[in-house]
Amino acid sequence: MKRIWRDVRRGAEYWKKFLFWGLCAPVVGAIGGLVGAAFSWCLKYAGLCREGFWPWILIGLPAAGLLIVLLYRVCGLEKDPSTNLVLASIREAEAVPMRLAPLIFVGTVLTQLCGGSAGREGAALQIGGSLGNFLARKGKLEPGEKRILTMCGMSAVFAAIFGAPVTAMAFAMEVAKVGSVLYSAILPCALAAVIGYGVSCLCGVEFEAFGRPDFPGLAWDSVLQSVAVAAVCALVSILFCAALHWAIRLARHYLRNPYLRIALGGAVIAGLLVLLGSRYGGAGQELIARALSGQALPWDFAVKLLLTVLTIAAGFKGGEIIPGMAVGACLGCALAPLLGMDPAFGGAVGMVALFCGMVNCPLSAILLGVELLGGEGILYYAVAAAVSYLLSGYSGLYSSQQFSQSKLEPEETN
C-alpha cells in the first residue's frame, strides 16, 4: 500500500511540473515571439536601407560603432558580457542583466544597417536569455527552474528569428554544456519555441529561404565526398574561432580605448566593403543563397571570414553563426568541383559542417539542415555533423562553453 501511495505521489509531481511549465513556457514563448518579430522587422528594414543607400551607408559605420560603445558604457556594461554570460547562467543560475536585451537589439541593428559583418543569432540568444532570466528572477523561481526558463527565452527568440523551432529547442538544451543535454528542459523549451515561432508568423515575419539543393541518393562516393568537405570545414572552423578570439585579444591590447578601436575598425571594414562589394556586408544570407545555388566564388569564404573577424574584434554587435554558415557554404561550394560534387550539394554540407564545428552541437546542426534545407539530405547532414564535431576538437565560439564528456572516450571530463 505504501508503495502504491508513493507511486501516486510521484505521478502527481510529474503532473504538477507539467502544468507549471504548461503555464510558464508559453508566456515566455509569446513575449519572446513578439520581441523576436520586432527584431526581425528592424533587421529587415536595416537590410533594405543598406541596399538602398549602398555604398554611402558605409560612411556611418564608424559613427554607429561609437554610438554602440557609448550606449553600453552609459548602461554600465563596458565589459560586454555577451553570449558567454547567458550560457553560464544556464549552468549556474547566474543573473543576466535585463538591460542586455535592448542593448544587443540596438547594437545589432546598427551594425547590420551600416554593413558590419555580423549575424543575428548572438542577439537572439542574449535577448532571449536575459528575458527568460529576468522573468525567472521576478517569479522567484528555484535555481533549476531559473536555468530552464533562461533556456526557454533563448528557444523562443531563436525560433522567432530563424523560423526553426526544433533547432531552437535543441540548441538551447545542447550548447551550454556539450555532451550533457538537459532533457528536463525539453517540454518547456519545445513549448516556448513553438509559441515563439507561431507568434512571429502571426506578426508577418518572413523567414530566410536559402534554397534547397538536389541531394543524391545513398551512394558511397557521395558519402566520402561529404566526409572530405566536412573535414576541411572542421579545420576552417578551428581557424575561424581561433582568429576571432585572437583578434579580440589583440585589438583590446593594442587599442585599449574602445571608441578608437571601434571607429578605426569601422573605417577599415567600410573601406574593404567599398572595394569588395555589398554581398559581403551584413550577416551573409546572400552568400549562403549564392552558394546553395552553386554560384559562390572561390574566395568568398575567406573574405567573409576576414570581415567577420574584423567586425567582432572591433566591438560591433551581432553573432558569428550566420556569417560562419556563410563561410561554410561558400567553402563547400568551392571544394565541390575539386571532389566531383555538385557545388550546391557541397555548399549545403559545408554549411552544416561549419555550424557544428563552431558550436559543438551535432544534433542541432542536423536539425538545422532539415529545417532550413529540407529533410532529403538528412543522411549527409549527419555525416557532416559527425565528422566536424570530432575533428574540430575543443575549439568553439563561446569561451564559457563546457564539455562534460571527452570527444574521444565515453568518459566524463573535469
Image: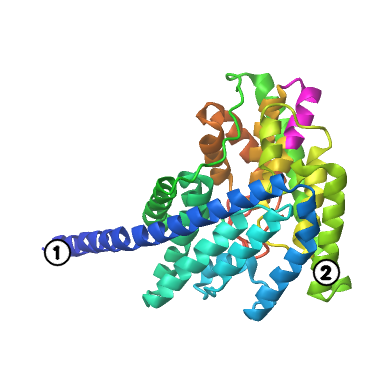
Check the image and tell me how it is coloured. Answer: rainbow
Q: Is residue 404 visible?
A: no
Give the residue drawn at x 85%, y 43%. 276
Dot 1 or dot 2: first in sequence order is 1
Disc 1: which residue: 5
Residue 144 disc label:
none
Up-down: is 50 above or below 154?
above
Give the residue drawn at x 40%, y 47%. 202
The residue stretch that appears in magenta = 330-341
Residue 261 disc label:
2
Q: How many marks?
A: 2
Up-down: is 256 above or below 65?
below
Residue with the most extreme left position: 1
Residue 80 in the image: state x and y as whole percent. Answer: 67, 72
Amino acid under label 2? Arg
Quadrant of the rendered image containing residue 78: bottom right
**Crowding at label 2, few (<14), some or many (≥20) Cα neighbours within 10 Å?**
many
Residue 209 in the image: state x and y as whole percent. Answer: 57, 35
Q: Secondary structure at mark 2?
A: helix
363 with respect to 264 (left or right):
left
